[in-house]
Image (cartoon, helix red, strand yellow):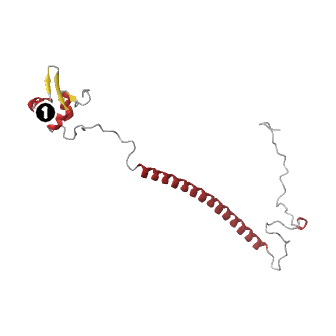
């Protein structure tokens, strides 16, 4: 397609028009009279076929002629306010989802810790039940709600079950044996 002055229709050569219309060059040559009537010209330099002539003759059926007035592109697509509102709502929902996922993770961690405490308490209870004598139970010192005895002097002393390892540790041997 060649450049034309503003206000004049775009012009094509014979081979270019045939390629765009999907027909052969010989078909366009045979229809020279109809093209000339529609506005095409034949000069020593070649054919000059305006696109509206091809449209008028039905060779470019899927093309529409250019509009009479220039078209200005829209600056905002229609319904832009609704799109903005939807995007804001989506962002809000994403933030709420992230907050809910974080709360769920914290709740899972708390539930897991509580489960471990329950299992430890159940194991302790089983050990206590196995070691309880048949007679009346001995009284234990009073303890406060936090689990520590009120009087540290009367608190039971924990004795390790095994003696600590008495072998010397070789902390800094650097690969040499002594």
Evaluate whether residue 118 shows in this view.
Answer: yes
Callout 1 secondary element:
helix
Q: Is residue 10 above or below residue 130?
A: above
Quadrant, the C terminus: top right
- Does residue 35 lie above or below 117 as drawn? above
Q: Which residue is mark 1?
A: 38
Image position of 29 (left or right of 71):
left
Along the line of sight, the residue nearer the viewer: 125 or 49: 49
Whether 151 is drawn above or below 64: the answer is: below
Residue occupying the point 88% across, 65% down? 152
Residue situated furthest right in the rendering: 153
Residue 134 spot, x, y in % from top left: 80, 79
113 sits to left or right of 49: right
Q: Label 1 neighbourhood size at 10 Å, few (<14), some (14-19), many (20+)?
A: some
- Figure quadrant of residue 47: top left
Where's the N terminus, which quadrant? Answer: top left
Q: Position of residue 43 (x, y in %)?
A: 14, 22
Q: Position of residue 89 (x, y in %)?
A: 49, 54
Tell me which corner region of the image, top left, top right, bottom left or bottom right, holds residue 9.
top left
User: For the point 41% across and 48% down, which residue is it?
Assistant: 80
Res. 125 image quadrant: bottom right
Res. 22 in view? no
Task: Tell me if 104 is positioned left or right of 43 in this view.
Answer: right
* Residue 84 horizontal/vertical position (percent): 45, 50
| Residue drawn at 79 percent across, 72 percent down | 131
């Amino acid at each position: 397609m060649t450049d034309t002055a503003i206000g004049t229709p775009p012009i094509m050569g014979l081979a270019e028009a045939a390629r765009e219309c999907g027909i052969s060059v010989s078909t366009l040559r045979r229809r020279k009279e109809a093209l000339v009537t529609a506005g095409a010209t034949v000069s020593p330099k070649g054919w000059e076929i305006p696109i509206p002539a091809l449209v008028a003759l039905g060779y470019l059926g899927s093309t529409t002629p250019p509009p009479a007035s220039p078209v200005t592109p829209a600056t905002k697509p229609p319904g832009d306010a609704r799109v903005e509102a939807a995007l804001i709502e989506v962002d809000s929902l994403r933030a709420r989802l992230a907050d809910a996922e974080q709360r769920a993770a914290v709740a899972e961690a708390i539930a897991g810790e509580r489960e471990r405490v329950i299992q430890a308490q159940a194991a302790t209870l089983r050990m206590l039940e196995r070691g309880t004598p048949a007679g009346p139970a001995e009284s234990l010192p009073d303890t406060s709600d936090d689990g520590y005895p009120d009087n540290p002097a009367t608190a039971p002393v924990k004795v390790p079950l095994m003696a600590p390892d008495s072998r010397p540790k070789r902390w800094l041997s650097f690969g040499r044996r002594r």
